[in-house]
């Protein structure tokens, strides 16, 4: 995955036209492969299950910080150097991952053959986990949230500031919420995250100014932090507890597919509902 990303960045510095779209498609595929390929490697490096969500939260912060650092550098340089630098970084990362993967290959092979409890998996818990991934980020409001904020009197600058508030709260809360999940329970953290997002949406619905939306964004960030790390740690421990930790990559892939499907369906449904609400016949009916 990292090798493909590295090559795509280098080629992006050189190609034009439809080739750019093709390479962007390669990067989108690589992004979708991140969870099922990288998270198993991270989980295998965490010997203490009691700190799993905390460590995954640290990984999330490092990843976000890297994006935050590289983005302004890339936008400030108007040549191909950022793309080539990304390619070199990706190639270095792929070499590191390959070395770690070979070190675990024999051990993973033994686990796969030594664990015979695959049929004893808690199928009900897996189905509920997939349902959680489907619904947890199915935000109907995503397609219309910026126009909605503007309709409530916010300027574009204020909307961008709200995005900054969201990112800052995520960074501050990632590790504490990871520790909360490890100490109190991963399912408890996930449920708290879902309830916090519901509260965030209710506050946004009733807000007509910057202060209300700032509270809503902060709660949305806390919600994301409560679920981030806790969900992957829960899935890994569920499988590991039944002797089939080697299935984590496949199960994470399935969960990620449900997550992406939920987001796509919610985006489409949210846009359709917004258009329906703008229907002049409905507006006339309400006015009458």
Image: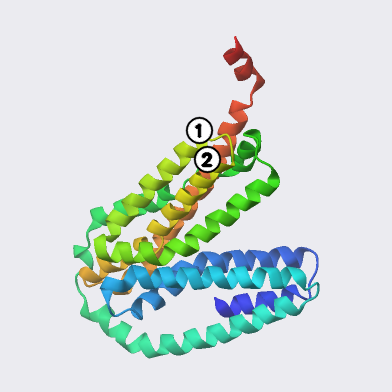
Image position, residue 283 (x, y; %): 62, 18
Q: Which mark is residue 212?
A: 2
Residue drawn at the location 30% of the way across and 86% of the way down: 107
**Which of the image's four quarters has the N terminus?**
bottom right
Of marks 2 and 1, the one in the foreground? 2
N-terminal label among 2 and 1: 1
Number of residues whose C-alpha sits closer than 10 Å to that of mark 2, classed few (under 14), some (14–19) or many (20 or more): some
**Residue 191 versus residue 94 in the image, above or below:** above
Provide residue 35's location: percent of width, then percent of height: 45, 67
Please give left or right for residue 129 compared with residue 58 in the image: left
103 relative to 88 in the view: left or right: left
Q: Which is more toward the observer, 208 or 92?
A: 208
Q: Quadrant location of residue 40?
A: bottom left
On the image, the x and y values in percent for residue 13 come to 76, 75
The residue at 26%/65% (across/down) is 183
The local secondary structure at tag 2 comes to helix
Q: Which mark is residue 206?
A: 1
Label 1, secondary structure: give it.
loop
The number of numbered badges drawn on the structure is: 2
| Label 2 – label 1 distance at C-alpha | 8 Å
**Residue 143 seen in the figure:** yes
Decide: marks 2, 1 in contact (CB < 8 A)? yes
The numbered dot on residue 54 is none
Residue 232 visible, this angle: no
């Amino acid at each position: 995955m990292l090798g493909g990303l590295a090559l795509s960045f280098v080629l992006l510095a050189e190609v034009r036209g439809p080739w750019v779209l093709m390479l962007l498609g390669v990067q989108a595929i690589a992004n979708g492969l991140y969870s099922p390929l990288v998270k198993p490697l991270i989980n295998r490096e965490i010997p203490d299950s009691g700190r799993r969500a905390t460590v995954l939260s640290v990984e999330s912060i490092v990843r976000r910080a890297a994006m935050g650092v590289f983005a302004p550098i890339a936008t400030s340089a108007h040549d191909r150097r950022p793309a080539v630098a990304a390619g070199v970084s990706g190639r270095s990362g792929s070499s590191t991952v390959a070395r770690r993967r070979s070190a675990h290959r024999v051990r993973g092979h033994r686990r796969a053959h030594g664990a015979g409890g695959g049929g004893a998996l808690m199928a009900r818990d897996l189905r509920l986990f997939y349902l959680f991934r489907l619904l947890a980020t199915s935000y109907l409001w995503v397609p219309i949230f910026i126009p909605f904020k503007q309709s409530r009197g916010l300027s574009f600058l204020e909307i961008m500031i709200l995005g900054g508030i969201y990112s800052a709260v995520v960074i501050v809360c990632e590790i504490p919420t990871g520790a909360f999940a490890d100490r109190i329970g991963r399912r408890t953290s996930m449920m708290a995250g879902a309830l916090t997002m519901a509260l965030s949406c209710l506050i946004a619905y009733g807000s007509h100014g910057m202060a209300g939306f700032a509270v809503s964004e902060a709660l949305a960030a806390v919600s994301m932090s409560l679920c981030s790390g806790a969900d992957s740690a829960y899935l890994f421990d569920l499988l590991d507890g039944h002797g089939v930790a080697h299935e984590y990559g496949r199960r994470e892939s399935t969960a990620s597919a449900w997550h992406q499907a939920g987001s796509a369906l919610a985006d489409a449904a949210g846009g359709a509902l917004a258009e329906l609400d703008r229907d002049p016949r409905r507006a006339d009916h309400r006015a009458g």
